[in-house]
Amino acid sequence: MKILRFIKNIVRRITPKFLIGIYHFSLALSGACFYRFPSRRLKVIGVTGTSGKSTVVELIAHIFRTTGHKTASSSSIQFRLNDDIEFNNLKMTMPGRWAMQRFLAQAVKAKCQYAVLEVTSEGISQHRHRFIDFDALVFTNLSPEHIERHGSFEKYLQAKSKLFSGLSKSIKKDKVIIANIDDKYADHFLSFIADRKIGFGQKNRDKTKEGIYLDKITLSPFGSKFTFDNHEVSWPLLGEFNVLNGLAAVAATWSQGISREKSSQALKSVKIMPGRMEIVMDSPFSVIVDYAHTPKALKFVYETVKIGLKGRMILILGACGGGRDHWKRPVFGKIAEEYGDIIILTDEDPYDENPAAIIEQVRAGVSDNFKGKCSIVLDREKAIKKAMHIARPGDVIVITGKGSEPLMCLSGGRKIPWDDRAIVRRLWSEMKAS
């Protein structure tokens, strides 16, 4: 396995980029031809952005299913064909080109009317979106991410833009762009050609002729209540950012003829998203698990947890290895110090990088004055155990970086079963029994 990985890395380094591009494009074309361009027999909605993609995909699909429409959905959480669910164990948000076309073909076979797909910048760069004819595209937000992979933020933006520029080439009629109008890059994504352009957000209501806009919001440690266009929703999802995800889902389904009233009713039955601000324990202390792996997402999570907090915030975090975005690591440490009372730094997915070196880079963002409250426990399970042993009633432990991911990636291509939530539950059972 190591030899194969070594050979693959060497081939990737010495092969000209244009040849790699041709290879990926050829895979996309051959997959689409083999499965007879299945997207043309479905209504396809793509969701992209830096954060919130998976949640928006799941919310859109939930509204469609609740309103009686057979729906397929693909996200970093799961692959779903109507009621048939397969959890995403790939450590890859957007599957490869043949896998995407096969999934869409399965959706057609299952008589789905809609397919909702999470689309990543990596997937776009590797042509995984090619030969998928989209009916609508949703833009959630944009902030620095995958900088090492793309070379710069501008190139990251360009990768996302390729998805929207390709919408005009889709054979579908009545193509739609849905954008978070409060994001500073909204104008950029709304500038691409489409038959309709729909906004969602809290302000900037004049940017689009049509939109779904937030009127009122009430946040609590147990969920949120919000009103848009005189439709009220109460649900268990935490944070303002999840409310925006809900508005994105309403806007996307509204573009397909689902009324605001039906969408708001559907959102009331939404349950907690796996690994997204998921409350794993709520007594005597709380434990929250979240996927946050960008500075902006991390701040959103911590700001949300602060609402109604009576005790201390104990933070467990690390940073992904594999050469991913080194610049983020000290930023994570700085943000954790800003919001946390106690910080425990630990492994996330080190891949072939030195785990201790990754954590030291995160720790570099923590000031000398706070380092007495910041410890390093490389073994992630032991880090969680330590946090649970020092937690007092009213405290909140926040574990970020992996969410509901079922695997941890180690050196040499090894992957071990992992689930932060299951570990918390097991450790709590052991603590109660001791």
Image (cartoon, helix red, strand yellow):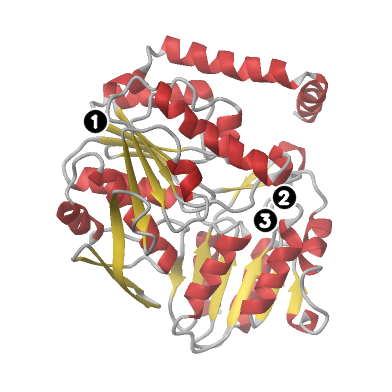
Q: Which amino acid type is shown beneath numbered disc 3? A: Glu
Mark 3–mark 2 Cα distance, whole angstroms, equals: 14 Å
Q: Which amino acid type is shown beneath numbered disc 1? A: Gln
Q: Are marks 1 and 3 in contact (CB under 8 Å)?
A: no
User: Is residue 76 in view?
Assistant: no
Vertical order, 351 against 335 (above or below) = above
Quarter occupied by residue 292? bottom right
In the displayed orientation, state which residue is furthest to the front: 206
Viewer-nearest of discs 3 and 2: 2
Quarter occupied by residue 400? bottom right
Give the camera-side residue of 296 and 415: 296
Q: Which amino acid type is shown beneath numbered disc 2? A: Asp
Give the camera-side residue of 116 and 164: 164
Mark 1–mark 2 Cα distance, whole angstroms, equals: 38 Å
Is residue 381 toward the left or the right of residue 365 in the image? left
Question: Which residue is located at x 76 percent, y 45 percent?
Answer: 323
Which residue matches tag 2?
325
Is residue 195 toward the left or the right of residue 101 in the image? left
Give the camera-side residue of 332 and 259: 259
Viewer-nearest of discs 1 and 3: 1
Vertical order, 175 against 428 (above or below) = above
Which residue matches tag 1?
113
**Residue 157 image offset from top left, x and y in percent:** 60, 42
**Residue 130 image offset from top left, x and y in percent:** 49, 23
Q: Are marks 3 and 2 in contact (CB under 8 Å)?
A: no
Which residue matches tag 3?
348
